[in-house]
Image (tube, helix red, strand yellow):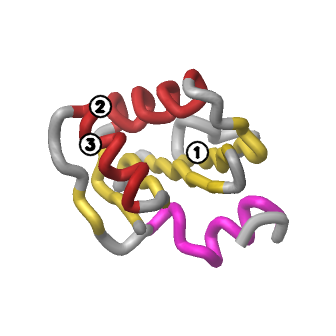
Amino acid sequence: MNLTGIVTDEWNRLLAHCVETGWQCVFSYDMFDKGIDYDLYILVRSGEEIRFGWDNWFEGEIQCSPQLRTEMEGLLGHALEEGEPSTLKSEVVEIVTGGRYN
């Protein structure tokens, strides 16, 4: 499921929450424009994957299971919007990760 239009502060809060609750980062975007124009994290825990994508135009996106969506909405106290991804399109992730994750 693709969650889109997440404001940057909330996206950062959700990412930090995942790391604090045992998710392991298996990929972190590391180019010169990290956090300025674009950012990407891929986290795993117990065989499940969650992707965090961000850019300065559309702000935050998250790909996750419906169960994780519910958990995140509970943490934020409001619903998250489902939509068509921009930063987390499979072809973008494939290019950014050098084909390691698609």
Relative to 31, 20 lies left or right: left
Please tell me how many numbered marks the rendered image carries: 3
User: Which sits earlier in the primary sequence, circle 1 or circle 3?
Assistant: 1
Q: Nearer the viewer, residue 67 or 61?
A: 67
Distance from Cα at disc 2 to Cα at disc 3: 5 Å
Q: Is residue 31 visible?
A: no
| Residue density around tag 3, few if under 14, some if 14–19, many if 20 or more, within 10 Å | few
Q: Residue at x 42, y 34 (%)?
A: 14
Q: At which x and y percent is residue 8?
A: 36, 36
Magenta stretch: give its range.
86-98
Q: Amino acid at mark 1?
A: Asp
Numbered badge on residue 39 = 1
Contact between labelled residues 3 and 1, with CB atoms less than 8 Å apart: no
Q: Is residue 91 above or below residue 1?
A: below
Residue occupied by mark 3: 73
User: Which sits earlier in the primary sequence, circle 2 or circle 1?
Assistant: 1
Contact between labelled residues 1 and 2, with CB atoms less than 8 Å apart: no
Q: Is residue 62 visible?
A: yes
Contact between labelled residues 3 and 2, with CB atoms less than 8 Å apart: yes
| Quarter of the C terminus within the rendering | bottom right
Residue occupied by mark 2: 75
Q: At which x and y percent is residue 53?
A: 52, 52
Which residue extends farthest top?
20
